[in-house]
Image (spheres, grey):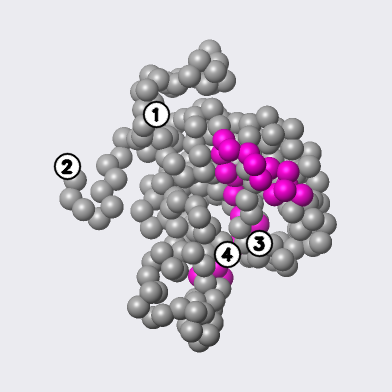
Amino acid sequence: MPLSTDALAFFSHPDADIDFSALQAELFPRHLAVIMDGNGRWAKARGLSRSEGHKAGIRGLQELVEASVKLNIPYLTVYAFSTENWSRPQIEVNTLMKLFAKEIEKQMPLLTKNQVKLNFIGDIESLPKAVQQSFEQGLEQTKDHKQITLSLAVNYGSRQEIVRAAQRLIQAYASKDLLLENLDEEAFANELFTKGLPDIDLLIRTSGEYRLSNFLLWQIAYAEFYITDVLWPDFSRYDLVRAILSYQKRERRFGSIGA
């Protein structure tokens, strides 16, 4: 199935060295996850503050969301702020919190135009009240959107998520709300922040780093990885297509023998 006329127009660029006819719509990832890395290095290379790098990273996220919509990718999850990021300089953390609080409402026209349903994963209750209120408003304003579910991982750590799930299951067992024989992978997954979302098909990490950084350790069990040296603010719609083309050339065997 070829891309729609609207999608081809969105990706049209005279210098794009991509064979769009090679894209196979039936082989697009259903759930795409992205570790958005390199904002600080992008800013440093330009003599800017790290805060300016994070602002540029928001523009990169806008492009990613729009491109994912054009490609009919129904689930997109991005790593915005990890539990470990609190150890960064306070001025940088404060800037990120202010951006989180302001950008949801600022981006609402884009989210509405593209029918983006917001979702948040992580320990949201430990965030500043202004951020929590902004997230709650975003959830309410986009709850009926149908085109794509955008999950922002904020104050998220996968190890902490897994421990939290185990604690909740132990409590359910202790209160006799859970029988031991009913504890399976599905029951465990239902206690994760990503309850209701499919597992990750393609994980992209920018800036050339080869590590997971405590991101979606359970959910990426059979994900394909794509690593690029491109720093996040420079990651374009064309970089996304290159990642998907690479993904579509892979044989996903899920532990079995190939064809």
Question: How far across and how far down the image is residue 229, in percent?
Answer: 51, 41
Real-space CA distance between mark 2 and mark 3, rounded to the nearest whole angstrom: 41 Å
Tell me the distance, in whole angstroms, between the alpha carbons under discs 4 and 2.
37 Å
Q: Cβ–Cβ below 8 Å for labels 3 and 4?
A: yes
Disc with the residue nearer the chain's start (2 vs 3): 3
- Residue labelled with disc 3: 155
Please provide the residue range marked out in magenta: 137-162
- Residue 180: quarter of image: bottom left
User: Is 152 positioned to the left or the right of 3 in the image?
Assistant: right
Q: Which is more toward the observer, 234 or 13?
A: 13
Q: Earlier in the sequence, mark 2 or mark 1?
A: 1
User: Of label 4 and label 1, which has the lower sequence position?
Assistant: 1
The kind of residue on which mark 3 rests is Asn
244 displayed left or right of 137: left
Residue identifier under label 2? 259
Q: Which amino acid does label 2 sit on?
A: Ala
